[in-house]
Amino acid sequence: MTGVNPLSRSRLLCAALLLACAPPAAAPPPAAEYAAVEREVARRVNAHRAARRLTALTYDTAVAAIARAHSLEMAAHDVPMGHDGFHERADRVDRFMPLEAIAENVALNDYSPARTVGVAVAGWLASPHHLENIEGHYDVTGVGIVRARDGTFYYTQMFVARRRISGGRP
């Protein structure tokens, strides 16, 4: 490194170390239009649960951020469509919300913004495994939706059963 003074070299090294040690970036907050779509998924899932006399799931924005990060990875083709990295996502949730159980549903479709949620939720309700998650003994949910450049919507919905403490309350 000729021509670089020692102070500049030190600053460059410090900057490189800071970047290397920085925590990974969190999932971006949802765009205003997708925040409403994410909540609509939770609303429809809760409507289904109510029709089955099941308790409503509480929406948690931190769980939604973890779900959104997975949808973003799928939309960017960093991971295949599916559940790759599920255990890591579960560990992230468990760090701030001790859990008894956790599950997730994923989906993708390229329907219009007006139809995409209905199609995704209907698909889950028609699938025995996805329906098991929707009707499971969970009390918290978070939904992350990302739209890829080609217009495809990627969905992740996480379901959390918080660990119970004495007295039966989470």
Image (cartoon, rainbow, N blue to C red):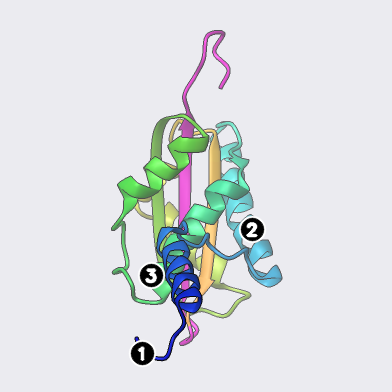
Dot 2: element: helix
Read off the magenta span: 149-170
- Residue at horizontal 55%, vertical 52%? 64
Mark on residue 77? Answer: none
Hey, which quadrant is residue 80 in on the image? bottom left
Amino acid type of the residue that numbered disc 2 sits on in the rendered structure: Glu
**Which is more N-terminal, label 3 or label 1?**
1
Measured as percent of width and height from the top left, residue 156 is found at 45, 58
Question: Residue 40 shows which numbered tag?
Answer: 2
Q: Amino acid at mark 3?
A: Met
Quarter of the view holding residue 101:
top left
The amino acid type, in three-letter code, at marker 1 is: Thr
Who is closer to the viewer here, 25 or 156?
Answer: 25
Circle 2 or circle 3, nearest the eye? 3
Expressed as whole percent of the image width and height from the top left, the position of residue 157 reads 48, 53
Magenta-colored stretch includes residue 153: yes
**Which residue is at the front of the view, 152 or 30?**
30
Q: Position of residue 151 (x, y in %)?
A: 50, 84
**Mark 1 → mark 3, Cα distance in angstroms:** 44 Å
Indicate which label's residue lies in the foreground, 2 or 1.
1
**Quadrant showing the C terminus:** top right
Label 1: how many Cα within 10 Å (few below 14, some 14–19, many 20+): few
Q: Reading the chain from its start, which is encountered first: label 2 or label 3? A: 2
Q: Residue at x 46, y 41 (%)?
A: 93
Q: Which residue is mark 3?
A: 74
- Classify mark 3: helix, strand or loop: helix
Q: Is residue 8 above or below residue 27?
A: below
**Residue wearing tag 1:** 2
**Residue 135 seen:** no
